[in-house]
């Protein structure tokens, strides 16, 4: 009976990544990226066309650190699933849709690549760094043993996660008002701890004791310590012309920071929501106004109206409001249609890897228009549920521990202006919370 030998990857000196490393069988590599490890580094290997040679890339997109194992091959390029950035066989970024047709990729937009990739004896080999051997070794009947795939590298700087100490000093949503009835209670998770919220005699209380519990905007809020955040004002909540409905709360494995980021992001819709509400590829810059506790951003978009040769331009204005840490609102004004659609997002940081998402849709007509027609709210809620499910599915792929606060850890383009403002807002919030902790020590 013939014996099968196994060989470990060829490595250089300890701590180096020199040498050739077998990473996958050639037959296993097609036009879907395969995550692999070589010399303690993570890559993806892929064929950019059927039966083409194998190419290797670094394992994360430089824009928002999306794992490139989730990418797809489009017209001989590797395309990130989040914002559609495309990379050629050399790893060069050749397409950023949000910049428009004349946009030029900024420095640092390219994907990294190993020194060499080659197929030999039915295996794909990767040399992370320059090595003295120009080709991989012959196997001579041995079977390689690829090394485990390491986790893609994370941010070098701090991230704002669900258990950040600064979050003690804020109001957090913990339940819809209807989830805690008179004489009843609900157990909730917040900042890694379990709380019991009671309603008795029209009053709310919590155990263990919290700084405060209150009801606002149809939501029960809990502040573990004296809050320093600024409440989000939702003008539609008191507008009699507005009709609204809550989506059923859902839970995500993503931290609240990255979820807030995607809710402010206008450039991902064409790729994440292609079949639901795709939006345009090019994203105009937003006007940004910094405010106490957060910011407001306004983005105007124009599109051609229906009808041949009419020359009519449709105007859509979207207003985004953020209040730290995790209160967000988007208001879309379709001025030609005479409608305003507002979506309220409130995020509850339960544990390091768990966030509860509360979403409310509000509709109203503008000017002298009639009331919101029957069925319009239900239709808007159904669309929002689909959009939210698509966003949460993508976030589950990212395996993020929080929102990076060091700007250089990601690559930002003009369409990311609101996302940059969010990072700075949360960095300020975290710094203020750290100062409070030091003062109380």
Image: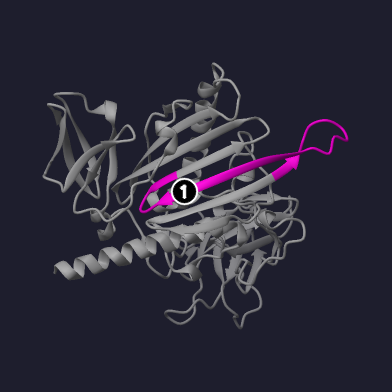
Q: Identify the colour scheme used.
A: one colour
- Residue situated in front as seen by the camera: 202 or 160: 202
The kind of secondary structure element at disc 1 is strand
Residue at figure coordinates x 61%, y 52% from the top left: 83
Q: Which residue is mark 1?
A: 321
Image quadrant containing the C terminus: bottom left
Residue 90 colored in magenta in the image: no
Magenta region: 302-328
Residue 324 colored in magenta in the image: yes
Disc 1 packing (10 Å; few <14; some 14–19; many ≥20): many
Q: Residue furthest front?
A: 368
Q: Residue furthest right?
A: 309
Quick check: can you spot residue 41? Answer: no
Residue at figure coordinates x 62%, y 80% from the top left: 133
Residue at figure coordinates x 69%, y 51% from the top left: 282
Quick check: can you spot residue 314? Answer: yes
- Number of marks in picture: 1
Task: Check the image and report above or below for 320 versus 242.
Answer: below
Residue 77 coordinates in the image, percent (x, y): 71, 56
Q: Residue furthest top?
A: 374
Q: In the figure, is residue 185 to the left or right of 336?
A: left
Q: In the figure, is residue 389 to the left or right of 334?
A: left
Residue 85 coordinates in the image, percent (x, y): 65, 56
Residue 322 coordinates in the image, percent (x, y): 43, 50
Residue 285 coordinates in the image, percent (x, y): 63, 56
- Residue situated in front as seen by the camera: 378 or 62: 378
Residue at figure coordinates x 16%, y 37% from the top left: 196
Q: In the figure, is residue 205 to the left or right of 72?
A: left
């Amino acid at each position: 009976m013939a014996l099968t030998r196994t060989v470990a990857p060829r490595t250089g000196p300890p701590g180096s990544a020199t040498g050739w490393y077998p990473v996958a069988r050639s037959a296993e590599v097609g036009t879907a990226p395969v995550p692999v490890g070589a010399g303690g580094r993570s890559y993806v290997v892929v064929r950019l066309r059927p039966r083409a040679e194998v190419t290797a890339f670094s394992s994360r997109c430089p824009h928002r650190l999306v794992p490139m194992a989730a990418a797809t091959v489009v017209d001989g390029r590797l395309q990130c699933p989040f914002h559609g950035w495309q990379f050629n066989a050399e790893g060069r970024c050749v397409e950023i849709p949000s910049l428009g047709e004349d946009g030029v990729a900024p420095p640092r937009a390219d994907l990294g690549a190993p020194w060499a990739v080659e197929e030999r004896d039915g295996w794909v080999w990767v040399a992370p760094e320059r090595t003295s051997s120009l080709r991989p070794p012959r196997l001579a009947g041995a079977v390689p043993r690829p090394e485990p795939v390491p986790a893609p590298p994370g941010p070098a700087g701090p991230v704002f996660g669900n258990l950040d100490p600064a979050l003690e000093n804020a109001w957090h949503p913990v339940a819809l008002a209807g989830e805690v009835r008179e004489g009843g209670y609900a157990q909730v998770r917040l900042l890694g701890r379990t709380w019991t919220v009671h309603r008795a005699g029209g009053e709310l209380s919590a155990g263990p004791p919290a700084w405060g519990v209150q009801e606002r905007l149809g939501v029960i809020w809990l502040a573990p310590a004296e809050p320093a955040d600024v409440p989000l004002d939702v003008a539609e909540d008191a507008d009699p012309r507005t009709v609204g409905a809550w989506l059923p709360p859902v839970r995500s494995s993503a931290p609240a920071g990255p979820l807030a980021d995607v809710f402010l992001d206008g450039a991902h819709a064409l790729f994440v929501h292609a079949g639901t509400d795709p939006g345009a590829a090019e994203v105009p810059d937003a006007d940004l106004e910094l405010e106490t506790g957060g910011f407001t951003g306004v983005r105007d978009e124009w599109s051609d109206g229906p009808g041949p040769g009419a020359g009519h331009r449709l105007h859509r204005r979207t207003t985004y409001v953020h209040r730290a840490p995790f209160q967000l609102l988007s208001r879309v004004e379709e001025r030609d249609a005479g409608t305003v659609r507002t979506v309220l997002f409130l995020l509850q940081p339960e544990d390091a890897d768990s966030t509860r998402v509360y979403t409310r849709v509000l509709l109203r007509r503008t000017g002298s228009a009639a009331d919101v027609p029957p069925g319009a709210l239900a239709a808007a809620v159904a669309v929002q549920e689909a959009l939210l499910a698509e966003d949460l599915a993508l976030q589950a792929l990212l395996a993020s521990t929080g929102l990076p606060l060091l700007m250089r850890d990601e690559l930002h383009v003009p369409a990311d202006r609101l996302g940059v403002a969010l990072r700075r807002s949360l960095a300020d919030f975290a710094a203020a919370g750290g100062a409070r902790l030091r003062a109380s020590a």
